[in-house]
Amino acid sequence: MDIRRATTVAELVAAEHLYDGPARQAWAERFLAAPGHLMLIAYADDGFPAGFVSGIEMIHPDKGVEMCLYELAVDTGHRRRGLGRALTEALVAEARERGCAGAWVPVDTDNEPALATYRAAGAADEGVFAMLGWTFDAG
């Protein structure tokens, strides 16, 4: 596997089978243009996008810059081979290189595969929390 930073809309769109829904060109362009947004894509030997991890730098006056692991996905046919862990470790390494004070990931407490992946990549449990959200019409 080769893990590389996505730098083009074409790369983001080619990985859309890994997303929750279809990629939109305008959103892919905006993602790439936004400071602090990062997507790493893992490519199989044949060039197939087998997984990705995305992160967003967040800054706060009392915490400095932290990397939020926004999403991680591995293609069904490439799971259970350490790819999720490798992608997570690559994002954490990038966060360190960027000078982030730390990294964090929101994860459902019953998502055992995700919890195992993040723990294997060195994440520590910081406790249980609730995540509340708002959904807006994206048009």
Image: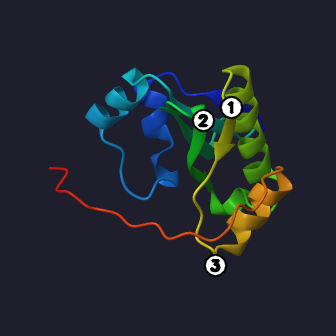
Say whether disc 2 or disc 1 marks the residue closer to the N-terminus. Answer: 2
**Mark 1: few/some/many CA within 10 Å (<14, 14-19, 20+):** few
* 121, 127: nearer the viewer: 127
Q: For this view, does 132 lie left or right of residue 136?
A: right
| Label disc, if present, on residue 66 of the rendered structure | 2
Which residue lies at the image location 72% right of the left edge and 56% below the top edge? Answer: 78
* 106, 21: nearer the viewer: 106
Query: Callout 3, which amino acid?
Result: Asp
Q: Which residue is mark 3?
A: 110
Q: Is residue 55 visible?
A: yes
Q: Which residue is mark 1?
A: 101
Image position, residue 64 (x, y; %): 58, 29
Say whether disc 1 or disc 3 marks the residue closer to the N-terminus. Answer: 1
Query: Callout 1, which amino acid?
Result: Ala
Query: In which quadrant of the rendered image does the N terminus lie?
Result: top right
Image position, residue 122 (x, y; %): 84, 50
